[in-house]
Image: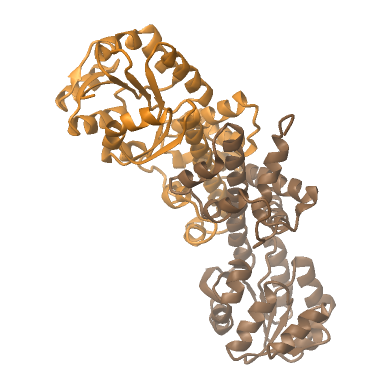
Chain colours: A orange, B brown
């Protein structure tokens, strides 16, 4: 498994591909954007003209595309699956709804290939540092076979179950918590200001108490800045909480807090701020509770 | 200020009174419950027959009663304020809505006494260990004068502002975050189970990721137990998120996540489980998403 196909060389995919090349894989990559292919070539990878060409005769294909629809298209329409060597291993590492992942995995298996559902968390920082957390579902033997690939891009690697979609499910649970923690940090700091407390003082106190969360400590300070650095965009949570709610809808599970938090990200995106740092979810609360004269 | 009056010897007040006695104060206490007075006497305090008798001639009065109404009654109806020495210091340490605290503080000041708005966090464990966090608002001189009292019961002591109600406001921000973090932990772990993931596996992963919160790590494991130990009751959050929403209502501030979380605690209390551990907020989600045959 020394030759590897990799499709989807975006903000996450490109640094992951670089780490795989560093780990010794001969990597054949594809992305629709020419610049991404140039960067891959500069990193020592082979730039291919299509997903099918990248997959041609390889034993493993990593998908780090934007969503489940793209994964479906790459595999079944653009010919990547047919191009793979018999019994090859497909790793879907994008964040997708669990039922969509289960359906893709089943179709891959029907054609005699192996499949792992392996979404990641840790963002672009974790992708660059090869310190991603990876939530993997699939057959134990396939999980073991994928170890060299997973270890080259991640640090905390969990085998969460054997059924395709269980990795995506854990990722959805993770994003539900991250998204609600982010939104409620905005609700709390905006509330502090509205009821006459310095939000920086309130933040210092709650960040060190039972009221703390990872998101509050990390994003709270940026919520109080006008133009914070962007480490992850508002629109990422529009998408990810959308996936959480799709997973809830597929399973007929009501998620009242996740749904309310999603609305806040949507509202900020609707203000034209979708590309701003996700800490700016606080602006939904500022707009909602705007007082006359403010 | 060696003699101190203390009214409200409940689950928080009694251990706080004990710590004040240990620190060398001659403490005159009152509570409506005879057992509380017996325990105070056993700890070396003077048990009084009324709030007025406890306050008689003392320079400082600590109130750790259930709510703002009780504080109001003790001070203005039961005669505690009139019984104090001239210019005495009143410390209101209960969790109350900021506007109610501001009104009480203004009336205390009108009568020539000094006032500090000083709610605490840290629960009964922090009360027993004298490790409470205390959010104090009032005049800087009064804050300094209260240091021996505050240091005898707390560890992290913040002067958050000069206006009565600002301490209560920071406490409301704190409880908003705690309550929503607790409810969303229940939403996430219940969601995990509903979509086919072992919630214990999901908890292990998210407790170590960017999805983590203090509440998730502390209460998450108890959410997966049938009859967990009670460290703080569901009804405490029914009350405290009620205070958060009252503060929002007083200031005309919409708090969509806090309001949704409050409903979950209310629902569990309505199931007859108000005295159970607050981790059992997860039962609201289990009831909400109950599937046929479960």
- Residue A201 horizontal/vertical position (percent): 49, 61
Q: Quadrant of residue A229?
A: top left
User: Eyeballing the image, is B39 above or below B188?
Assistant: below
Residue shown at 20% from the left, 17% from the top? A47
- Residue B47 horizontal/vertical position (percent): 77, 88
Report whether residue B86 is seen: no
Using the image as rendered, state which of residue A175 and residue B62 is in the foreground: A175
Using the image as rendered, state which of residue B53 and residue B89 is in the foreground: B53
Give the left or right position of residue A156, taking residue B127 as reference. left
Q: How many numbered discs sit on the rendered protein? A: 0
User: Eyeballing the image, is A198 above or below A109?
Assistant: below
User: Eyeballing the image, is A60 above or below B202?
Assistant: above
Residue shown at 63% from the left, 88% from the top? B21
User: Eyeballing the image, is B259 above or below B157?
Assistant: above
Give the left or right position of residue A92, taking residue B219 as reference. left
Using the image as rendered, state which of residue B40 and residue B8 is in the foreground: B40
For the C terminus of chain A, give its image quadrant. Answer: top right
Give the left or right position of residue B286, taking residue A240 as reference. right
Residue shown at 57% from the left, 79% from the top? B150
Give the residue furthest to the front: A141
- Residue A267 horizontal/vertical position (percent): 55, 32
Using the image as rendered, state which of residue B202 and residue A120 is in the foreground: B202
Report whether residue B152 is seen: yes
- Residue A154 horizontal/vertical position (percent): 32, 38
For the N terminus of chain A, give its image quadrant. Answer: top left
Give the left or right position of residue B216, taking residue A115 as reference. right
């Amino acid at each position: 498994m020394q030759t590897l196909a990799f499709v989807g060389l975006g903000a996450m995919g490109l640094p992951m591909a670089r780490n795989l090349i560093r780990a010794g894989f001969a990597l054949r990559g594809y992305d629709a954007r020419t610049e991404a292919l140039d960067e891959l070539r500069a990193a020592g990878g082979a730039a291919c003209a299509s997903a099918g060409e990248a997959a041609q005769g390889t034993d493993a294909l990593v998908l780090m595309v934007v969503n489940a629809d793209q994964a479906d298209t790459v595999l079944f329409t653009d010919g990547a699956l047919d191009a793979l060597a018999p019994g090859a291993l497909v790793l879907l590492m994008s964040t997708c709804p669990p039922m969509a992942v289960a359906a893709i995995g089943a179709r891959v298996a029907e054609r005699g290939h192996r499949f792992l559902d392996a979404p990641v968390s840790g963002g672009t920082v974790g992708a660059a540092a090869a310190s991603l957390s990876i939530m993997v579902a699939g057959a134990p033997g396939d999980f073991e076979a994928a170890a060299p690939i997973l270890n080259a891009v991640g640090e905390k690697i969990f085998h969460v179950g054997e059924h395709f979609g269980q990795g995506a499910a854990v990722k959805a649970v993770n994003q539900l918590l991250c998204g609600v923690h982010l939104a409620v940090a905005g609700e709390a700091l905006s509330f502090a200001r509205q009821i006459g407390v310095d939000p920086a003082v309130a933040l210092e106190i709650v960040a060190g108490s039972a009221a703390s969360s990872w998101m509050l400590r990390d994003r709270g300070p940026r919520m109080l800045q006008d133009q914070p650095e962007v480490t992850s965009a508002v629109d990422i949570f529009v998408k990810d909480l959308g996936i959480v709610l799709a997973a809830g809808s597929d399973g007929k599970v009501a998620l009242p807090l996740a749904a309310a938090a999603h609305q806040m990200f949507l509202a900020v995106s609707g203000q034209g701020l979708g590309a701003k740092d996700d800490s700016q979810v606080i602006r939904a609360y500022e707009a909602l509770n705007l007082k006359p004269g403010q």
